[in-house]
Image: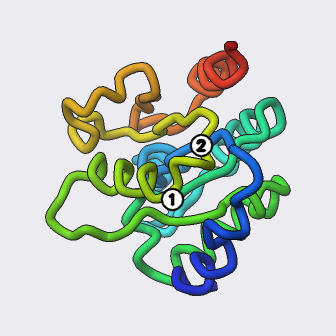
Amino acid sequence: MPPEAVAKEFAPSRLYFYTMRIIFLDIDGVLNHWDGIQKHGMDYIGDAQVAQLARVVDATDARFVLTSTWRLEDKNITLVREAMAKHSIDEMLIDFTSNLGYTKRAAEIRKWMFDNRHHIEKFAILDDDDEIIGDQGFNDQFFHTDGTKGLTKEIADKMIDYFLQQ
C-alpha cells in the first residue's frame, strides 16, 4: 500500500477517540543487522528481530510509526508489512513520519507528535542511530539498538517495562 493510501486509511479523524502507545520505528540496525544485510542483501529483515518487536506489541498493544528511509519506497513498505505479518503485527503499522528532507529524524518525529498529539498516550523511539535523534529531549523515550545485532530481547524487555510503567 503506498504511503499516501496508508496515511489516508489511518487519518487522524479515524484515530480520534483513543490514545495509543507509539513506537517510532527505524528498520536498518533495528529489524535487521549488518551481518544479515551483507549475507542476504539490502532488503533483509531479520525474523528474530521482528519476533522481539512482536513481544513488545503483545505485552503493550503499541502501534508503529515508520521513521526509517524504508518508508519512502513502496517495495520496502511491502517488505516491512510482510515481515510483520509473519508475526501478526502488520496491522500495528499505522503511519509514517513526513519526509522533511534535510532535517534530522527527530524533527520528523516531533512533527508527527504535534499533528497527532491528542492520540499519544506514551511513545518510544527505536533506532540504532543516536545522532539522528540528537539533543531533542528524547532520552527517556529513546531505545538504542546495536546495528550489529538489531532489536534484542534485552532492549525489548526494557521497552515493555517502559510502556507498562505508570
How many marks the image carries: the answer is 2
164 and 36: which one is in front? 164
Q: Is residue 55 above or below residue 38?
A: above
The quadrant holding residue 102 is bottom left
Q: Is residue 37 above or below residue 156?
A: below
The residue beneath circle 1 is: 66
The mark closer to the camera, 1 or 2, is: 2
Q: Position of residue 124 (x, y in %)?
A: 52, 34
Kindly identify the residue that appears in the image at 46 percent across and 27 percent down: 141
Q: Quadrant of the N terminus?
A: bottom right
Task: Determine which of the numbered discs, if any, sits on residue 7 in the image.
Answer: none
Q: Outermost residue, left direction?
A: 102
68 and 145: which one is in front? 68
Structural distance between the alpha carbons of marks 1 and 2: 15 Å
Kindly identify the residue that appears in the image at 38 percent across and 51 percent down: 109
Mark 1: give few (<14), some (14-19) or many (20+) Cα within 10 Å. Answer: many
Kindly identify the residue that appears in the image at 27 percent across and 51 percent down: 107
1 and 148: which one is in front? 1
Q: Quadrant of the C terminus?
A: top right
Q: Are marks 1 and 2 in contact (CB under 8 Å)?
A: no
Amino acid type, residue under disc 2 in the picture:
Ile
Q: Position of residue 30 (x, y in %)?
A: 49, 44
Q: Position of residue 135 (x, y in %)?
A: 20, 30
Amino acid type, residue under disc 1 in the picture:
Leu
The quadrant holding residue 7 is bottom right
Relative to 86, 84 lies left or right? left
Q: Position of residue 88 (x, y in %)?
A: 85, 56
Q: Regarding mark 2 in the picture, which secondary structure is present there?
A: strand
Task: Determine which of the numbered discs, if any, sits on residue 120 in the image.
Answer: 2
Relative to 132, 36 lies left or right? right
Relative to 148, 133 lies left or right? left
Kindly identify the residue that appears in the image at 45 percent across and 67 percent down: 41
